[in-house]
Image (spheres, rainbow, N blue to C red):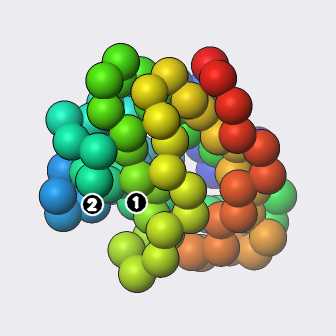
Amino acid sequence: LRGLSGALGATVTAAGTAAALSEALICPVDSGNDSHKVKMFSATAIGQICIVMNVDTAQDAVVRNGADDATLTTLGEGIGCILVSNATGDNWYVVAKGAV
């Protein structure tokens, strides 16, 4: 788990313009609107793992790639996902998704 500044990142509030996630193993997200977005940080190594979890109880959160030009997944209320990088940079892929 290289390149992580901390295991638990601060909760990021999703917004109409994608809010950047902090580089952490676990990234909690809160959303005020079903179409609000967050975007991934740049991976620092192949095989890097990030868990994004929607802690909101009423709104979905859209997870976008770092360039904010593609949706990786949409997380419903109380749903999380595990993403793994296949290279450094903007190379994240969802490998699992479910209730947190």
Residue at point 44%, 27% (across, down): 77
Q: In which quarter of the image is the C terminus?
A: top right
Q: Where is residue 41 in the image (x, y as percent from the top left)?
A: 47, 60
Q: Position of residue 60 (x, y in %)?
A: 38, 39
Q: Is residue 9 visible?
A: no
Q: Quadrant of the N terminus?
A: top right
Q: Position of residue 96 (x, y in %)?
A: 77, 44
Residue at point 35%, 18% (across, down): 57
Instruction: Place residue 45 in its image quadrant.
Output: bottom right
- First along the sequence among labels 2 and 1: 2
Residue at which label 1 appears: 39
- How dense is the environment of label 1, judged by Cα within 10 Å: few (below 14), some, or many (20 and up)? many
Q: Position of residue 40 (x, y in %)?
A: 47, 59
Q: Could you tell me which secondary element the residue under label 1 belongs to?
A: strand
Disc 2 to disc 1: CB gap under 8 Å:
yes
Residue at which label 2 appears: 18
